[in-house]
Amino acid sequence: MTFALHGIPVSKGIAIGKAVLISRAALEVSHYLVEPGKEDAEAQKLLDAFDQVRLELEQLRQGLPKDAPQEMAAFLDVHGMILADPALAEKPIKLIRTQRLNAAWALTTELNDLLEQFAEIEDPYLKERANDIRQVAERVIKALNAQKKDVLNDSEFLPATDIGVESIIVAHDIAPHDMLRFKEHAFTGFVTDLGGKTSHTAIVARSMEIPAVVGVRHASEMIRHGDWLILDGEQGLVVVSPDEQLLAEYRKLQSQAAKEARKLQQLKHAKTETLDRVDIELLANIELPEDAIQAVKLGAVGVGLFRSEFLFMDRKQALPDEEQQYQEYRRVVDLMHGLPVNIRTIDVGADKALGAGGTDVSQTGTSPLGLRAIRWSLTEPEIFLTQLRAILRASAHGQARIMIPMLAHAKEIDETFRLIEKAKQQLHQRGQAFNPNIQVGAMIEIPAAALVLPLFISRFDFLSIGTNDLIQYTLAIDRADHAVAHLYDPLHPAILNLIANIIEQAKRANIPVAVCGEMAGDPSLTKLLLAMGLTDFSMHFSQLLLVKREILKANVGMLRARFPRVLKAYEPEAQAKALERLLA
Ligand code: PEP
Ligand code: MG
């Protein structure tokens, strides 16, 4: 039966493919299709893992000291009984044989089903058993992982080619870093139950240029593995089991979009200036060093935001040391051939959790109002100093610059500069090269910073407005929470006034100012930002040509003349009229 689900469109484009359901637990384990003919061997692996856990439990039981609490033995008995129940292995084995899921994936699929059933049980004693089942299954997964050398091998994510058709990931939620792990694989779309328009998961999906719809509430429950899906990343629509006619219509739209994209490529070499000859700088936002290759190809004149924290978010690895970081930063600097590269210091917390090597930020992240970005770095001075030294060393090879996220207080600025000086001294003592005059910039993304801008203007070399957070904190809504996603509004008069004011003050003080939040990459907002006097736009490279097309059609003089009316319009109707006139 065909049905449609609605969510928040976060990455445009149309994807057509078969659903690949990724359970939350499955994101923690490898999941891939076993080669045809190897199903029995895979099933045997699962049975072996069960045997091994059975043995472990028996050994634990026998090794219990005489004075061990009775509950301990009872607990092991319950786990032994769960393990002995043939039903627990039955379904996963069927999934291995019929759908060729690898053993861990098959087991986590069954585990999720069981946990859902238990969630509906009223009896508190029986409900509690859900935890026992989870623990037993986790032991089996551990045993399965131990059978392999590389537990979480990225290449084991299911490549679309393995199943012969294009595939679309459907998940309850995907962490930003997990999203990046999909980069290597040919998935053609993403659907998640949770998420907001500027959540970092959405930003990564956009950066991968893969259509995505988030906040589709019950998608992972209503869509079944293998269902055909149409995903419309423009409308936020997911059509499940579409009929042939609908498929044909969307295929046509897909090929029209491909034609448009080809046409857009012609703008690659055009000078970025408005009709009235105002030069505009288009910079790139990147998450991984290799993104710089595309950025340069598409004409970016620098990296306006390198989200360095993505180097720190790998669950499998320890945090990168100074040498590893230096190599990564240097790579970007080299790829940019002398163009500026703003390396934003680590911004973990909120929806971005630190990887396995981290200590303080949990795997699930923290509140957006919590220990995030520079606040976290200042509580971990050794990690911060390591990063600063790595950036400084990269500055010996090109225009690496330091950019600090989420500052609000003068004392945070003082402490940041004290540590930058310390990092310089340390390198000096070691005799290692760096640019002693490295530029240091601040992100303006907390309303408090915007309201005391002269403080930032006097202390920093450049400013960059992080509109994603500025909107989040000004409107008091969690940008990753789909429940308040409808209140995330870049056109709120408070936001327009705030941004316009920052740009105006910075221009008057002659300090470079850019916008590096998602607003800069939204072509429907390009003229509005030009009207505010913005000349430096930093966005993901996939948006560069779309924004350029708007710039080439704009007349800044006219936009600026019409802009004051937009700023003064507080009523929605008046604002709509003023905007219509501005963009006409
Ligand atoms: C922002 O807040 O606008 C920004 C660019 O930083 P991030 O999205 O990484 O928080
Ligand atoms: Mg931010």
Image (tube, rainbow, N blue to C red):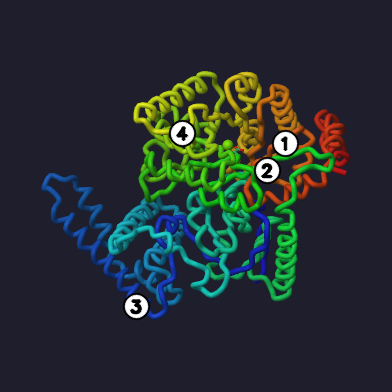
The dot on residue 40 is 3
Residue type (three-letter) at the residue carrying disc 1: Thr
Q: Quick one: label 4 or label 3, which is nearer the N terminus?
A: 3
Marks 1/3: CA distance? 62 Å
Ligand 1 lies in which image quarter?
A: top right
Which residue is pictured at 30% across the width and 61% down the height?
Answer: 149
Marks 2/3: CA distance? 55 Å
Q: Is residue 402 above or below residue 149?
A: above
Left or right, residue 564 beside residue 342? right
Q: Quick one: label 1 or label 3, which is nearer the N terminus?
A: 3
Residue that label 4 marks: 392
Residue type (three-letter) at the residue carrying disc 3: Asp
Which residue is pictured at 50% across the width and 58% down the height?
Answer: 182
Relative image position of residue 449 (x, y in whole percent): 61, 24
Marks 1/4: CA distance? 27 Å
Marks 4/2: CA distance? 25 Å
- Kindly state the secondary structure of the residue where label 4 is placed: helix
